[in-house]
Amino acid sequence: MKGQQLPLSVQLRESASFDTFYVGPNELAVNALRELGSAVLIYGALASGRTHLLQAVARERRCPYLPLQDLREMGPDALEGLDQSAVLCLDDLDAVSDDRDWSMALLRLLDARRSANKVTVLSANAAPDRANIALPDLRTRLTLCAVFGLKPLDDNDRETLLRERARARGLEMPVEVSAWLMKHLPRDAGSLLSALDQLDRAALSAKRRLTVPFVQTVLAQTQL
Amino acid sequence: MYTEDIWTQCVRWLEGELPDKDINTWIRPLHPVASRERLLLLAPNRIVLDRVKADFLAPIRRAVKASAGDEAPEVELAVGAAEQARAPDPEPTAPRKMSAPVSTSSIDEVPAAFTANLNPQFTLENFIEGKSNAHARAAAQHVVETPGAAYNPLLIYGQSGLGKTHLMHSVGNAVMRRTGRARIAYLGAEQWMNHMVMAIRHGRADEFRSFFRSVDALLIDDIQFFANKERTQEEFFHTFNALIDNRKQIVLTCDRYPKDVDGIDERLKSRFTWGLSVAVEPPELETRVAILLAKAEQNKVRLPEDVAFFVAQRIRSNVRDLEGALATLSATARLRGEPLTVEFARSTLKDRLAAYERMVTMDNIKRTVSTYYNIRLTDLSSPRRTRSLARPRQIAMALSKELTQHSLPEIGEAFGKDHTTVLHACRKVAELRHEDLKIREDYENLLRQLGY
């Protein structure tokens, strides 16, 4: 039997930029990140878009972006020498802030950057006063930032986001398809977008348009 | 083509090759330095260097070839600071260590790194004085006028975010201005330790010692981090003695009175308090308002007085929190194009303020106190009068009076007592806080736990 055609890797790469961020209710946070008048800390639940936004800042300002979650095991030496870049993004603060050595290193880095007038952008899963932080001193450094909570998207926002993203990839997503997805998938932006990724690939490979039955088959396959 | 241009082109090329995340995390921290035949990329640290070497050197080489064609320079990697490479003179300058392609940070950097890192924005002039910190400020002023004399060491202690570091930098800056070319080293206690460890490992302990013993002033932040580091304490003890003997000024900060820090050698503790020890307390309302107004002016934000008052009344814990609130307010006002009013502040700072207001219910105080003293919640309102219950109960009442708006009868009722008992408790606790160190510490810890 002839195998399914494997899609060439010709999909448009979704890059994490401000243009591809669905602003929705978070205009304030997004504007603060575009403007960067001072240190900014954004917090929000899982899949609220923190990483996307910080990547967007890194891309726009051509500055380093540190995923602290990934760097945790390498130890706080990973922060060394980063006091000089004009802008620096530190993602997932909560992944390391329970550790004393990391907290200490972060505290010194933030102080050094502040006194050199360098802007630091941080993200965490909670506001500084509620986060799990090993050092009280680090907490007070964090409260210094302009703090913005990312508001979760409501279902309307999410559906719009899904359809917009699909369109950006040149994929027409009929209303009934997006409605079906909203009803049957976990509704966080991350899950929806990874489903979109899958559908995009499947549609390309099968040369099909998105219809409810097609979507059902594709997603059923992967859930087995 | 200039280095920066070549590198900018390379990065653009790589953006089409590698995932955004890799670009942002591993490629953007690299800083290019070039000579004719080679492109040296400086990584901020070992970790970046190792990763780039392992995974990205090949694509970088391809990118360089694609951008510069046949004249593509050789790509090399090293650990180094971008800033050194970006020296003021326009000549293409060599990075710190041209010879060794892979260098690690070394003791050579100590003098440069720790004598030039005073924050010039921190001065005595822009330190907002209030009752809570007047003593500390006066002491700092005195040290500036006669460094190395009577107040040596100057020890400033208090919780985080109350201006200890500001005062410390002010002393450094003022001494620098007075004496012109003084060598002033400022660093955190744990940085001091790290450099000591590194110096010993590289067999350069003598250089480390002679450097720190030859400075004109030594400013060490957060000496509580010396706790339980015996070797470090030993080394610091000698440095300390040498500097004091030579009448060089030492300024230290600590998050509490050093005698209360466990794990610090007694000899060292007593030396820390040889000179003058001054406390900084959380600022009172008027000072908080003054701080907000001054910061606003500094940042060119128009902050009406009633808004400053509103914020200062609600944010009581420390100065950084105040500054953070101001930053959030001014950013939001600017982005929305709305004027800064009390109503605006209330809605913008809702989350931040909720953190405070959430804390201060009587239930919360009772729960916090009973957990702190490890007694049952019901014991706090029981009629039993044993000392082990009466003290915590009195403290809880005093906290309720200080932190909530409840009337004395209401507070009494919550503890099954009448209002005269509450009044007595408040007086007693106020008295004990003066006389009994343990009670004072307990009370302050509880205040902190309650978010103050």
Image (cartoon, coloured by chain):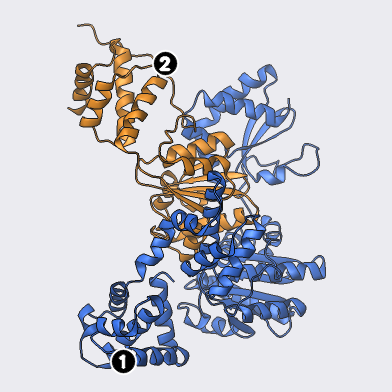
Chain colours: A orange, B blue
Q: Quadrant of the N terminus of chain B?
A: top right
Which image quadrant for residue B244?
bottom right
Nearer the observer: mark 2 or 1; the answer is 1
Name the amino acid type tagged 1. Thr
Residue A192 appears left or right of B28:
left
Q: Which residue is at the front of the view, A164 or A62?
A: A164
Q: Residue at x 52, y 80 (%)?
A: B258
Residue B145 appears left or right of A102:
right
Q: Chain of mark 1?
A: B
Q: Is residue B137 above or below residue B390?
A: above
Crowd tier of the residue under label 2, counting other residues whose Cα lies within 10 Å: few below 14, some 14–19, many 20 or above: few
Q: Which residue is at the front of the view, B247 or B422?
A: B422
Name the amino acid type tagged 2. Val
Q: Residue at x 74, y 32 (%)?
A: B35
Give the label on residue A127, or none: none
Residue A21's x, y, as percent? 44, 33
Residue B361 visible in the shown view:
yes
Quick one: SS at disc 2? Answer: loop
Residue B257 appears left or right of B277:
left
Which image quadrant for residue B190?
bottom right
Residue A211's x, y, as percent? 24, 16
Q: Chain of mark 2?
A: A
Q: Are marks 2 and 1 in contact (CB under 8 Å)?
A: no
Residue B378's x, y, as percent? 20, 80
Q: Is residue B274 above or below residue A190?
A: below
Give the label on residue A10, or none: 2
Residue at the top extreme, as displayed: A2
Q: Which residue is at the front of the view, B431 or A5?
A: B431
Q: Residue at x 31, y 33 (%)?
A: A156
Crowd tier of the residue under label 1, counting other residues whose Cα lies within 10 Å: few below 14, some 14–19, many 20 or above: some
Residue annotated with mark 1: B421
